[in-house]
Amino acid sequence: NMMFMRAMRILKIAKVSRTVRLMQQFSELRLILNSMLGSLRNLFWSIAMLALIFYLFALVFVQLTASSLEDALSNGTSDPDRSHKLETFGSVELAMLTLYKASTGGDDWSLPYKTAVASGDIPACLFIFFIAFMQIAVLNILTGIFVEKAMKLAKPDRDRLALDISRNEDAL
């Protein structure tokens, strides 16, 4: 019985060493996994920042849309775009979803833009500013942050690779 347990322990050690050897063969996969796991905190804060930006712009668009609908109601005219305005910017949640889809390519942003134009010149200009701000500034900055973090996480792996190469040269 003891002999069997020792044999199993040796087999287990061999299995672990084979796994380690296999992991050395997949250094790129290990690098990708380390970069992804190391970037989780950045991902959380990026999502929080995007949610805040979407929330602030959604509040403004809901307020401007409500003002536009109120002006049409006080003038005694019916707004032909009323249902579309309510579907797009009728609540903060809908406006956030609309802005998210427009800025990430989920929907063509010309549809919400038409709704913003129907609400007035200020909402139309603000919507163009929002799209430009998201595409040019925010998403590029977030991409840069993730690339920088991945490069920092890859540096120890490059150092280890250089050490392995120098050891192999010394062995020759």
Image (cartoon, helix red, strand yellow):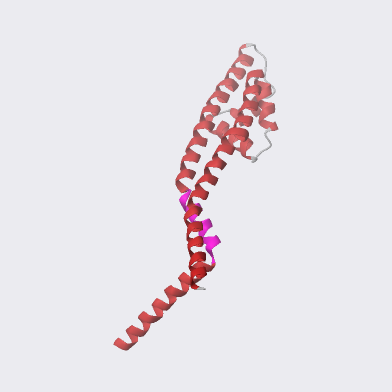
Residue 121 screen position, x and y as percent: 66, 18
| Residue 56 belongs to the span the image colors magenta | no
Name the residue rendered at 61%, 12% in the picture: 74
Residue 20 screen position, x and y as percent: 46, 70
**Number of on-image labels:** 0
Name the residue rendered at 62%, 15% in the picture: 73
Task: Judge by depth and name the residue closer to the eye, 31 or 114.
Answer: 31
Q: Is residue 41 visible?
A: yes
Q: Is residue 28 above or below residue 140?
A: below
Magenta stretch, residue numbers: 26-39
Side (left or right) of 114 relative to 66: right
Name the residue rendered at 44%, 45% in the picture: 41
Side (left or right) of 85 relative to 25: right
| Residue 35 belongs to the span the image colors magenta | yes
Q: Is residue 119 above or below residue 164?
A: above
Q: Residue furthest top?
A: 75
Majority SS type along the magenta span: helix
Q: Is residue 1 visible?
A: no
Q: Is residue 121 above or below residue 7?
A: above
Task: Judge by depth and name the residue closer to the eye, 88 or 162.
Answer: 162
Residue 18 screen position, x and y as percent: 47, 74
Residue 88 screen position, x and y as percent: 62, 31
In which quadrant is the N terminus drawn?
A: bottom left
Task: Judge by depth and name the residue closer to the eye, 66 or 11.
Answer: 11
Question: Which picture quadrant has residue 97?
Answer: top right
Question: Which picture quadrant has residue 129?
Answer: top right
